[in-house]
Image (tube, rainbow, N blue to C red):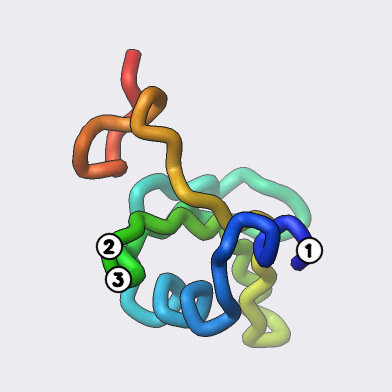
Amino acid sequence: TRRMFQRGISVDDVRHVIDSGHVVENYPDDQPYPSRLLLAWCQARPIHVICAHNTDDREIIVVTVYEPDPGKWDSTFTRRRA
C-alpha cells in the first residue's frame, strides 16, 4: 500500500482498474490462487493491477499496482516489448 501511494495511485484508481479493466495477461498457475494482469486508464494514466482470485472465499487479492513503463510496453500497454 505504501508503494502504491508513493506511485501516486489511489484506492479509487485500483477499484476502477479491478471493476472495469481489460485483462492483459492471465496467470492460471499462480499459487495459492490464479491471478491476472489488468489495465485501465485513470484520467490520463495507464495503470496495471495484478490481482489474485480466491474463488472459494469470493475475494480479490491485490498483489501489486503500478504505472507501466513505456519502454517495456507497447503504446497500448497491453503487449510487452521484445
Q: For the residue marked with disc 2, what is the amino acid?
A: Ala
Left or right of residue 16, residue 79 in this image: left
Q: Which residue is mark 3?
A: 43
Asked whether disc 2 touches disc 3, contact meaning CB atoms under 8 Å apart, the reply is yes
> Label 1: how many residues lie within 10 Å, few (<14), some (14-19) or many (20+)?
few
**Quadrant where the C terminus is found in the figure:** top left
SS type, badge 3: loop
* Sequence-first tag of 1 and 2: 1
Left/right of residue 17 with respect to residue 66 in the rendered view:
left
Left or right: residue 73 versus residue 50 is left
The residue labelled by disc 2 is 44
Where 44 sits versus 75, above or below? Answer: below
Total marks shown come to 3
Secondary structure category for the residue under label 2: loop
The kind of residue tagged 1 is Arg
* Circles 1 and 3: CB atoms closer than 8 Å: no
Quadrant into which the N terminus falls = bottom right
Q: Residue at x 35, y 49 (%)?
A: 24
Q: x and y percent of residue 75 in the render?
A: 21, 36
Residue 58, image quadrant: bottom right
List the residue tagged with mark 1: 2
Q: Using the image, determine if residue 70 lies above or below residue 9.
A: above
Label 1 residue SS: helix
Q: Compare marks 1 and 3 and give the one earlier in the sequence.
A: 1
